[in-house]
Amino acid sequence: MTDYLIATASVHVTAAAADYLQGRLDPSEDSVVVVGVREPGRHERDAGDAANVARSRLAAAMPETEVREGDPTTELLAAINDHDPDVVIAGANAGTEGASGVGSTTATLLERLDRPVVVVPLPDL
Protein backbone atom coordinates (compact mmCIF):
# COMPACT_ATOMS: atom_id res chain seq x y z
CA MET A 1 0.00 0.00 0.00
CA THR A 2 1.28 3.43 -0.96
CA ASP A 3 -0.14 6.77 0.11
CA TYR A 4 0.33 9.49 -2.52
CA LEU A 5 -0.08 13.24 -2.12
CA ILE A 6 -0.44 15.32 -5.27
CA ALA A 7 0.67 18.91 -4.68
CA THR A 8 -1.06 21.12 -7.23
CA ALA A 9 -2.36 24.55 -8.10
CA SER A 10 -3.39 23.91 -11.69
CA VAL A 11 -5.24 21.44 -13.89
CA HIS A 12 -2.03 20.90 -15.87
CA VAL A 13 -0.10 19.67 -12.84
CA THR A 14 -2.99 17.44 -11.77
CA ALA A 15 -3.36 15.93 -15.25
CA ALA A 16 0.40 15.22 -15.41
CA ALA A 17 0.26 13.59 -11.95
CA ALA A 18 -2.73 11.47 -13.01
CA ASP A 19 -0.82 10.38 -16.12
CA TYR A 20 2.13 9.40 -13.92
CA LEU A 21 -0.08 7.35 -11.60
CA GLN A 22 -1.79 5.47 -14.43
CA GLY A 23 -0.36 1.95 -14.35
CA ARG A 24 1.29 2.51 -10.96
CA LEU A 25 -1.75 3.04 -8.79
CA ASP A 26 -3.58 0.08 -7.27
CA PRO A 27 -6.98 1.57 -6.40
CA SER A 28 -7.77 -1.31 -4.02
CA GLU A 29 -4.57 -0.77 -2.01
CA ASP A 30 -3.25 2.76 -2.54
CA SER A 31 -4.63 6.10 -1.47
CA VAL A 32 -4.42 9.52 -3.10
CA VAL A 33 -4.93 12.91 -1.56
CA VAL A 34 -4.85 15.94 -3.83
CA VAL A 35 -3.93 19.22 -2.16
CA GLY A 36 -4.61 22.32 -4.20
CA VAL A 37 -3.30 25.62 -2.96
CA ARG A 38 -5.07 28.82 -3.87
CA GLU A 39 -2.49 31.54 -3.59
CA PRO A 40 -3.15 35.26 -3.44
CA GLY A 41 -3.26 36.86 -6.87
CA ARG A 42 -4.06 33.67 -8.80
CA HIS A 43 -7.37 32.85 -10.36
CA GLU A 44 -9.59 31.54 -7.58
CA ARG A 45 -10.85 28.56 -9.59
CA ASP A 46 -7.43 27.05 -10.39
CA ALA A 47 -7.03 24.92 -7.24
CA GLY A 48 -10.68 23.85 -7.26
CA ASP A 49 -10.53 22.91 -10.94
CA ALA A 50 -7.37 20.92 -10.22
CA ALA A 51 -9.26 18.91 -7.59
CA ASN A 52 -12.06 18.23 -10.11
CA VAL A 53 -9.53 16.88 -12.63
CA ALA A 54 -8.22 14.50 -9.98
CA ARG A 55 -11.71 13.25 -9.14
CA SER A 56 -12.33 12.58 -12.83
CA ARG A 57 -8.96 11.15 -13.90
CA LEU A 58 -8.37 9.10 -10.75
CA ALA A 59 -11.98 8.11 -10.03
CA ALA A 60 -11.15 4.43 -9.39
CA ALA A 61 -8.94 5.46 -6.46
CA MET A 62 -11.56 7.85 -5.04
CA PRO A 63 -9.01 10.54 -4.24
CA GLU A 64 -9.49 12.79 -1.25
CA THR A 65 -9.24 16.43 -2.24
CA GLU A 66 -8.62 19.56 -0.26
CA VAL A 67 -8.04 23.18 -1.16
CA ARG A 68 -5.91 25.36 1.07
CA GLU A 69 -5.28 29.07 0.82
CA GLY A 70 -2.01 30.91 1.27
CA ASP A 71 1.63 30.51 0.39
CA PRO A 72 2.01 27.30 -1.65
CA THR A 73 5.22 26.16 0.03
CA THR A 74 3.92 26.72 3.54
CA GLU A 75 0.56 25.11 2.85
CA LEU A 76 2.01 22.09 1.06
CA LEU A 77 4.54 21.42 3.80
CA ALA A 78 1.70 21.61 6.34
CA ALA A 79 -0.45 19.25 4.25
CA ILE A 80 2.43 16.78 3.94
CA ASN A 81 2.87 16.93 7.70
CA ASP A 82 -0.88 16.37 8.21
CA HIS A 83 -1.28 13.49 5.73
CA ASP A 84 2.18 11.87 6.03
CA PRO A 85 2.20 10.39 2.50
CA ASP A 86 4.75 7.86 1.29
CA VAL A 87 5.26 9.75 -1.99
CA VAL A 88 4.68 13.37 -2.98
CA ILE A 89 3.96 14.19 -6.63
CA ALA A 90 4.50 17.76 -7.82
CA GLY A 91 4.78 19.55 -11.12
CA ALA A 92 8.07 21.03 -12.18
CA ASN A 93 6.42 24.43 -11.85
CA ALA A 94 2.97 25.94 -11.36
CA GLY A 95 1.81 24.89 -14.81
CA THR A 96 0.97 28.39 -15.93
CA GLU A 97 1.76 29.82 -19.33
CA GLY A 98 5.35 30.97 -19.58
CA ALA A 99 6.58 28.98 -16.57
CA SER A 100 9.69 26.88 -17.13
CA GLY A 101 12.26 24.93 -15.17
CA VAL A 102 11.75 23.86 -11.59
CA GLY A 103 9.80 26.40 -9.58
CA SER A 104 10.63 27.55 -6.06
CA THR A 105 7.88 25.51 -4.38
CA THR A 106 8.98 22.24 -5.96
CA ALA A 107 12.64 23.06 -5.28
CA THR A 108 11.81 23.56 -1.60
CA LEU A 109 9.91 20.26 -1.45
CA LEU A 110 12.91 18.48 -2.98
CA GLU A 111 15.27 20.09 -0.47
CA ARG A 112 13.21 19.65 2.68
CA LEU A 113 11.26 16.41 2.45
CA ASP A 114 12.47 13.09 3.82
CA ARG A 115 10.47 10.97 1.37
CA PRO A 116 10.35 10.49 -2.39
CA VAL A 117 9.23 13.50 -4.39
CA VAL A 118 8.25 12.75 -7.98
CA VAL A 119 8.48 15.77 -10.27
CA VAL A 120 6.21 15.26 -13.27
CA PRO A 121 6.85 17.00 -16.57
CA LEU A 122 4.15 19.33 -17.76
CA PRO A 123 2.80 19.50 -21.30
CA ASP A 124 3.71 22.46 -23.45
CA LEU A 125 1.12 25.16 -22.89
Image (spheres, rainbow, N blue to C red):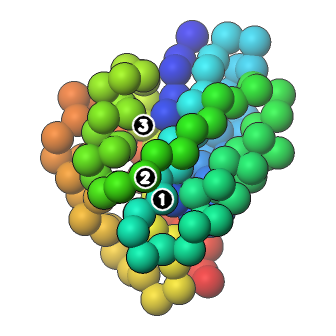
In the image, 25 versus 38, the foreground residue is: 38
| Label 2 with label 1: CB-CB less than 8 Å | yes
Quickly name the residue at label 2: 69
At x 69%, y 30%, the residue is 63
- Residue 84 position within the rendered picture, expressed as x and y whole percent measured from the top left: 37, 20
Q: Quadrant of residue 104?
A: bottom left
Tag on residue 95? Answer: none
Q: Can the viewer see residue 15 in this picture?
A: no
The image shows residue 31, relative to residue 91, as above or below, that is: above
- Residue 46 position within the rendered picture, expressed as x and y whole percent measured from the top left: 60, 65
In the image, 109 versus 52, the foreground residue is: 52
Mark earlier in primary sequence (3, 1): 1
Q: What is the quadrant of the C terminus in the image?
A: bottom right
- Residue 14 position within the rendered picture, expressed as x and y whole percent measured from the top left: 62, 54
Amino acid found under the numbered disc labelled 3: Val
> Alpha carbon of mark 3 to alpha carbon of mark 1: how far?
18 Å
